[in-house]
Image (cartoon, rainbow, N blue to C red):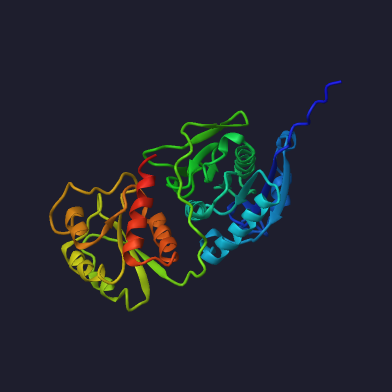
Amino acid sequence: MTQIEATHKPVIALGTIGGTISMTAAKPGEGVKSTLGAEQLVNSIPGLDRVDVELRLHSIANMASGSIRFQDLFKLLGWANQQIEQGADGVVIVQGTDTLEETAFFLDLYWSHQAPLVLTGAMRSPGQAGAEGSANILASVQVAMSSAAQGYGALVVMNDEIHQASSVRKVHTTALNAFASPVVGPVGAVREGVARFFRLAPVRKVLAQPEQISQTTLLIETTLDENPILYSHLVQLGYAGLVIAGLGSGHVSIPVTEELSHLVKEIPVLMASRAGAGSTTKAVYAYPGSEIDLQQRGVIMVGSLCPRKTRLLLNAYLWQGLSRTELEQALIQHLALFDSI
């Protein structure tokens, strides 16, 4: 008699930490606040009961995503690691969308598992017409339980699109299709309940979790005719690194350039672009304040990584306890991975 082996039912840990997706109003006409936990959100999802999956639900926190701190993210990472160690096949984190792209990127830097780590949220609260939170959670579970999602690190699932943590950005304040991956596009999509991927899993570099996170960095967006005085006080203010969202493909004014000539001797300075899509250049422009000039002064061009994620990457490497030379070499090698997609 032939014994039929039972198929494995995927186990997905789902944790909520707040955000629009969990917000309700106390009275009609009032603003919304985070009130719903994991069980309340999941119980309201049509069709989830027909998905062959075991869900482990956790209401971890209830905060607006703008109030998330690095300490919170390391605790969240510890929880997610524990879920995998206890047998989960994937993890879904539900949070607010304001910092969703940053949370995903931060967690991706330290996510050492092949199992998928999926983040999602919603643009409309549950009480609004057309609220899409249930659909986003359902799609996220379907991605997290898919064997095809193995090895991609942290993913953002919104509007049935699957985005890599390194490329996804919130590009609209309120639209349902607020998340996009400029230039490269989504890495996949959920179609008829199945996760489909358009590209192979990327080469990733996973960092060791730091013993201390005392060093802080600053992100400055350079503007027309800006006053450069702040740059001369950054070290005194305690900053250990600077990221600039530069003009065009990585440029600043002459007065700012003069300040950077001194500052780069004290702390690492990284140049991203404020444009929203595209990459910094390395060998196109040679005027004072251009990328060729800035590189000669010691500024690092980051390529296609957005300014916000560049700041997180710089923080992560400052926390690794490297020498200045080791830090800059490691950053350059890591940044190159994001332009190899």
Q: Residue at x 64, y 57 (%)?
A: 79
Image point 70% across, 39% down: which residue?
10
Residue 153: x and y, percent? 52, 46
Is 174 placed left or right of 56 in the picture? left
Could you say which is closer to the camera, residue 254 or residue 75?
75
Which residue is more in the foreground, 223 or 130? 223
Q: Is residue 313 visible?
A: yes
The quadrant of the rendering that contains the N terminus is top right
Extreme top residue here? 1
Q: Quadrant of residue 235?
A: bottom left
223 sits to left or right of 119: left
Query: In the rendering, at what x and y percent does residue 121 appear?
Result: 57, 48
Report whether residue 23 is seen.
no
For the image, the number of numbered tags is 0
Q: Residue at x 27, y 49 (%)?
A: 280
The answer to whether residue 190 is above or below residue 126 is above
Where is the C terminus found, in terms of image quarters? top left
The residue nearer to you, when weighing 297 against 259, is 297
Residue drawn at point x = 46 percent, y = 72 percent: 214
